[in-house]
Image: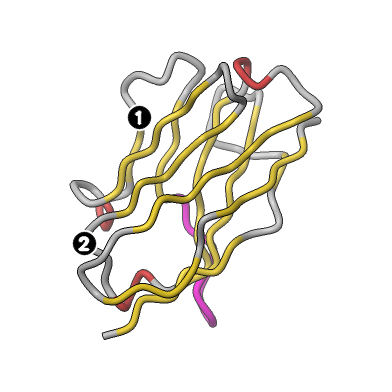
Amino acid sequence: QVQLVESGGGLVQAGGSLRLSCAASGGAFSSYTMGWFRQAPGKERELLAAVGRSGINPYYTDSVKGRFTISRDNAKNTVYLQMNSLKPEDTAVYYCAATLRLRYEFDDWGQGTQVTVSS
């Protein structure tokens, strides 16, 4: 099991950028596939992006392709989500998650960080 702590959320105007960070501890970070999710009020939690152990060929859901970038620094036990061209509909609580499974079935979760995009 790995412990995850997100940071970097906040209030930003539409068109702006934020970078979320997720620091991991208590596990072999480089062995985990890492993902970023979000959940808006009244909506289901959705997987936005995921990156495997090597950091190559990350996955993105269509709504964030070209705007968000997931990356990881295994030396710092940290995964990032760079978010550009933010829209009001990106407003949500953002979570990072980790898994040792081969599929995107995540077992360990952070507490979440709020992102609010004003119009």
- Give left or right: position of 94 versus 71: right
Q: Amino acid at mark 1?
A: Pro
- Helix, strand or loop at mark 2: loop
Query: Residue beneath label 1, please?
Result: 58
Q: Position of residue 53 (x, y in %)?
A: 51, 17
The residue lying at 41 percent from left, 50 percent from top is 19
Circle 2 is placed at which residue position?
A: 85
Mark 2 or mark 1, which has the lower sequence index? 1
Residue 77 drawn above or below residue 113: above
The quarter of the picture where residue 100 lies is top right
Query: What's drawn in magenta, residue-wise?
Result: 40-47
Mark pair 2, 1: CA separation: 19 Å
Residue at image point 44% right, 36% down: 50
Location of residue 72 in the rendering, given as x and y in whole percent from the top left corner:
47, 28
Q: Write the residue at 61% across / 50% down.
A: 6
Q: Which quadrant is home to the C terminus?
A: bottom left
* Residue that appears at 55% across and 19% down: 74
Q: Position of residue 29 (x, y in %)?
A: 65, 22
Q: Are marks 2 and 1 in contact (CB under 8 Å)?
A: no
Check if residue 58 falls in the magenta segment: no
Q: Which mark is residue 89?
A: none
Q: Is residue 19 left or right of residue 31?
A: left
User: Is 90 rendered above or below residue 5?
Assistant: below
Q: Nearer the viewer, residue 12 or 109?
A: 12
Image quadrant in which the N terminus is located: top right
Query: Can you tell which quarter of the image residue 86 is in?
Result: bottom left
Q: Secondary structure at mark 1?
A: loop
